[in-house]
Image (tube, rainbow, N blue to C red):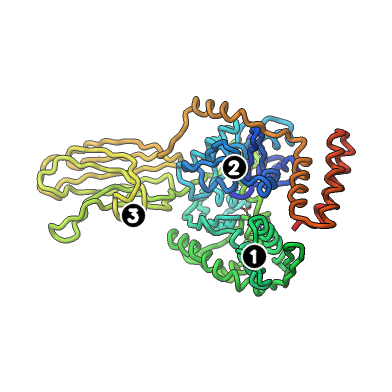
């Protein structure tokens, strides 16, 4: 079975295609979203998702999150004294998703289409692929998140050429992509974004607003109190959409503070964030050579697009209503599942050609004559520009700069700086040219870049017709099959927690945290129910455990703040 996976910064989802449509597979707790959070304890037990997140306040040194941001980098995370790379942590999330899907579907899951942000460069894509392999999944195709969204909305099936803007505001990242459907080809035309803007910033604004109104100050709160304040802010933020006001309550050293926050106040406080959102929208439009009015449809993905402040802002900006038929959290995973079905060549889905864009500029080093006879060395000449649709092939003609020059060296570079030395060196190639006065000999340099991140550089000496070429594979630290197997074996000491006790574990952790936060009567009440639950667990009687757990959960629900 091939599945589609949205490996998100905050949450991940897995979906499959059946009976003509994509469907989300619920996880072991029956939920569609699995937080992309991993925890490893001293004994090497691995916790993934909500359980791992719940361990955050009790055992912060054992938990890692938002590691997607560091995919493809050398960053290391230390969990309970053990070291992990970002792709290894991602592989643990993928492993949990795979297990849940296998148990739900009753068959083995061997292959996955995984979505990646459109701006992910080759190195980050390869790291994602490796994460899949470490989880025991074959990953032959990846799909960019905005393309997956368009596919999920079925937009590839349109008969008319259409331009879409996919607006993706997640927990901690913001991406805008412009796609064009043209003659059955779905192209990403431009991408832009802000890696440090997302729903979390809107939560911060809510938290600050409460502090301002209540006269409390963040410095006076302990680390744990700050975590609690943030959780309350998150709750208030999610509740405020579609309402006039929310009540923000926060219990602080034995007393409960309550403040009313109106939608209007919140909107005003978010003004600065909304201004920040505007920038990448403008940039993607200008990179694609389009105006706001050229966009036919706006699609929303990412949990934070549920915020009415964000939706209202977009309606004002585009003067049209965004398409919100699908759940913004689930759209990408559904699209990945459709892509999986396309890969399997299922009859229910029409195969469309998906292209991508190059997320960086590829070029070469040149000497520039800025005045008659005056040269500046070390300049960068772009050949394939950022946001060019790939596969792409472009040629640039270059001339000799010295009399009797007999060689030309073509240095292949990646980056956006005007100066060669600031860009990333990928390789080089040297060709011989006949000696002649400067400017008389020329070479044609052709860069061909394909969807698998292979760059072919061909240099042709125009006077002799001789050509030479090199192929540069995306710069990365790709592991060989053996290396993957070795690391898989190394990771196998980790004990994935058996699926069936997950609810008990989660309830226990949540109860422990709440006990720490509570005081007085509530604390005693919690203690009573926790003790009863533990006694039931000790006895091992199935029904008894379920009843005690339900009772404890009810008490927890009463005061989850
Ligand atoms: P994602 O990374 O796409 O899972 O998005 C996560 C972000 O969406 C978090 O910042 C959440 O607070 C936010 N979010 C989820 N549901 C809502 C909601 N109903 N209203 C506002 N924000 C939400």
Q: Residue at 33% of width from left, 54% of height from top?
A: 417
Residue 95, percent from left and from top: 64, 35
Q: Earlier in the sequence, mark 1 or mark 3?
A: 1
Q: Is residue 254 above or below residue 430?
A: below
The image quadrant where one finds ligand 1 is bottom right
Residue under label 3, please give it: 417
- Distance, label 3 to label 2, CA atoms, is 36 Å
* Residue depth check, mark 3 versus mark 2: number of the one nearer the observer: 3
Q: Earlier in the sequence, mark 3 or mark 2?
A: 2
| Res. 270 image quadrant | bottom right
Residue 142, percent from left and from top: 54, 41
- Distance, label 1 to label 2, CA atoms, is 40 Å
Element at label 3: loop
Does residue 34 appear anywhere in the picture? no
Label 2 CB-ligand 1 distance < 8 A: no
Residue under label 1, please give it: 207
Residue 458, percent from left and from top: 30, 39
* Residue depth check, mark 1 versus mark 2: number of the one nearer the observer: 1
Residue under label 2, please give it: 339
Q: Nearer the viewer, residue 312 or 217?
A: 217
Element at label 2: helix
């Amino acid at each position: 079975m091939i599945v589609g996976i949205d490996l998100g910064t905050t949450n991940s989802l897995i979906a499959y295609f059946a009976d003509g449509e994509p469907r989300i597979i619920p996880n072991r707790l029956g939920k569609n979203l699995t937080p992309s959070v991993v925890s490893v304890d001293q004994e090497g037990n691995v916790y993934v998702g909500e359980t791992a997140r719940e361990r955050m306040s009790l055992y912060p040194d054992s938990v890692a999150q938002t590691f997607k941001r560091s995919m493809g980098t050398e960053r290391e995370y230390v969990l309970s004294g053990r070291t992990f790379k970002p792709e290894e942590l991602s592989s643990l999330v993928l492993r949990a998703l795979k297990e849940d899907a296998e148990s739900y579907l009753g068959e083995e899951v061997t292959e996955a289409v995984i979505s990646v942000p459109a701006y992910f460069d080759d190195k980050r894509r390869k790291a994602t692929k490796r994460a899949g392999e470490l989880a025991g999944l074959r990953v032959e195709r990846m799909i960019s998140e905005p393309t997956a969204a368009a596919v999920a909305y079925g937009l590839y099936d349109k008969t008319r050429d259409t331009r879409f803007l996919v607006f993706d505001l997640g927990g901690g990242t913001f991406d805008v992509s412009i796609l064009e459907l043209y003659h059955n080809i779905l192209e990403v035309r431009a991408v832009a974004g802000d890696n440090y803007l997302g729903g979390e910033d809107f939560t911060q604004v809510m938290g600050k607003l409460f502090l301002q109104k209540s006269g409390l100050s963040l410095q006076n709160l302990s680390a744990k109190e700050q975590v609690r304040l943030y959780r309350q802010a998150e709750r208030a933020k999610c509740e405020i959409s579609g309402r006039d006001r929310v009540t923000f309550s926060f219990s602080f050293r034995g007393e409960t503070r309550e403040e009313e926050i109106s939608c209007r106040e919140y909107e005003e406080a978010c003004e600065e964030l909304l201004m920040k959102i505007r920038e990448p929208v403008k940039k993607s439009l200008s990179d694609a050579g389009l105006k706001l009015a050229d966009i036919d449809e706006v699609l929303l993905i990412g949990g934070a697009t549920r915020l009415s402040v964000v939706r209202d802002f977009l309606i004002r900006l585009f003067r049209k209503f965004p398409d919100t038929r699908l759940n913004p959290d689930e759209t990408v995973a559904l699209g990945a599942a459709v892509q999986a079905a396309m890969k399997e060549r299922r009859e229910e889905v029409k195969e469309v050609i998906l292209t991508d864009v190059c997320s960086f500029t590829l070029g070469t080093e040149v000497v520039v004559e800025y005045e008659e006879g005056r040269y500046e060395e070390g300049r960068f000449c772009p050949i394939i520009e950022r946001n060019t649709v790939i596969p792409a092939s472009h040629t640039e003609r270059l001339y000799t700069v010295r009399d009797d020059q007999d060689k030309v060296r073509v240095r292949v570079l990646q980056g956006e700086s005007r100066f060669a030395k600031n860009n990333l060196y990928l390789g080089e190639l040297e060709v011989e040219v006949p000696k002649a006065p400067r400017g008389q000999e020329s070479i044609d340099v052709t860069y061909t870049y394909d969807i698998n991140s292979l760059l072919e550089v061909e240099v042709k000496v125009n006077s002799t017709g001789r050509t030479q070429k090199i192929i540069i594979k995306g710069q990365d630290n790709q592991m060989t099959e053996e290396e993957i197997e070795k690391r898989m074996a190394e990771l196998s000491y980790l004990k994935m927690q058996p699926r069936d006790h997950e609810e008990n574990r989660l309830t226990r952790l949540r109860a422990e945290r709440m006990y720490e936060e509570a005081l007085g009567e509530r604390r005693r009440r919690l203690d009573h129910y926790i003790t009863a639950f533990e006694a039931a667990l000790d006895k091992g009687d199935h029904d008894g455990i379920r009843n005690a757990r339900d009772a404890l959960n009810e008490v927890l629900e009463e005061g989850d703040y």
